[in-house]
Image (tube, helix red, strand yellow):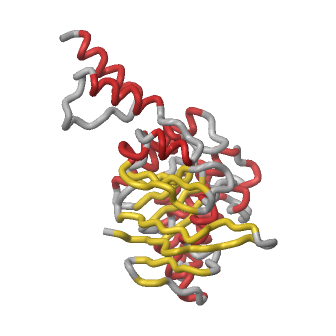
């Protein structure tokens, strides 16, 4: 079932620079969608349309099949269901402390102090940053800022969580931790949509993939199908993920049955190799 949809979106930046060119995209409820493409292909611009930060020149955004509105009340209702975490957390953090910053979204939704506090505590726990509650936001590391920014969106309990380059600027340990958190959020029922340049990240996390170029979707579908299509990937200036290539080779060699799921993590490939060696 489609929860969020872009229907013929066009948008140009000041000066007439085209960002979206009749873009169409459907987001399935409860799925994880990765948006891949080169710089300037429209990925971030689309996310900002999907939660009403930007308004299209033409076309429309639909939520549960209904066109969204742009009045203040309509935007508040829309953003309570579709949250956006920006790539640069500094663009999103502005309060004196972590707790105050994460509180902003729930309070702006009109929640009372008690319920808002409960949501903030829960979001900090989910993001594993409860110990940062009283920390001034300007004293956080880059990875901590990113987790706080996402916690601010999570505290609003959106049905759809939009993330712009979620692992950008994070070291390996922080990236692994964040992806673990995002999987848990997804398993709890939240629909995820994230942009990335990393085909390996898309393969490990996404159920579905949309390839962008020139402000349009050039291909979309299940991640295993799209990320194995070298021609489609080439149209977005990308190469197939190494892990998927290894998994497909393992299937070709008979190490995996035709109906068995493909490994999505490197340890799973190693386990498969060890099992086959011991046969």
> How many numbered circles does the render carry?
0
Find residue 210 and report its horizontal and vertical position in percent: 47, 55
Residue occupying the point 36% across, 50% down: 222
**Residue occupying image coordinates x 59% and y 89%:** 71
Residue 178 seen in the current view: yes
Residue 152 coordinates in the image, percent (x, y): 57, 63
Q: Position of residue 52 (x, y in %)?
A: 58, 76
The quadrant where residue 92 appears = bottom right
Depth order, front residue of 104/78? 78
In terms of image quadrants, where is residue 149?
Answer: bottom right
Which residue is outermost to the right? 15
Q: Can residue 100 be seen in this view?
A: no
Viewport quadrant of the C terminus:
top left
Q: Which of these two is toward me, 133 or 64?
A: 64
**Compared to 266, does 67 lie above or below?**
below
Residue at position x 46%, y 47% from top?
Answer: 181
Quadrant of the frame with the N terminus: bottom left
Residue 95's place in the image compared with 76, above or below, is above
Outermost residue, top side: 278
Say which quarter of the image contains residue 109. Answer: bottom right
The image position of residue 161, as x and y in percent, is: 48, 62
Residue 20 placement, left or right of 126: right
């Amino acid at each position: 079932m489609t929860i969020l949809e872009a229907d013929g979106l066009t948008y140009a930046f000041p000066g007439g620079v085209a960002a979206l060119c009749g873009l169409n995209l459907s987001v399935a409820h409860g799925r994880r969608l990765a948006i891949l493409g080169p710089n300037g292909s429209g990925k971030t611009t689309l996310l900002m349309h999907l939660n009403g930060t930007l308004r299209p020149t033409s076309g429309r955004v639909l939520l549960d099949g209904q066109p969204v509105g742009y009045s203040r009340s309509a935007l508040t209702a829309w953003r309570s269901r579709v949250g956006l975490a920006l790539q640069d957390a500094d663009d999103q953090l502005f309060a004196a402390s972590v707790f105050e910053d994460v509180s902003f979204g729930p309070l702006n939704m009109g929640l009372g102090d008690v319920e808002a506090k409960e949501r903030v505590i829960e979001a900090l726990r989910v993001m594993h940053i409860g110990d940062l509650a009283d920390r001034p936001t300007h004293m956080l590391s880059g990875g901590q800022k990113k987790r706080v920014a996402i916690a601010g969106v999570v505290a609003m309990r959106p049905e759809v969580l939009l993330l712009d380059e979620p692992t950008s600027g994070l070291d390996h340990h922080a990236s692994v931790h964040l992806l673990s958190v995002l999987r848990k959020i997804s398993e709890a029922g939240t629909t995820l949509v994230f942009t990335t340049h990393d085909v390996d990240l898309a393969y490990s996390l996404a159920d579905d993939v949309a390839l962008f170029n020139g402000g349009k979707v050039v291909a979309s579908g299940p991640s295993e199908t799209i990320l194995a299509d070298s021609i489609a990937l080439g149209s977005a200036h990308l190469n197939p993920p190494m892990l998927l290539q290894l998994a497909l080779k393992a299937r070709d060699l008979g190490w995996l049955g035709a109906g068995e799921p493909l490994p999505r993590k490197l340890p799973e490939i190693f386990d498969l190799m060890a099992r086959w060696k011991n046969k």
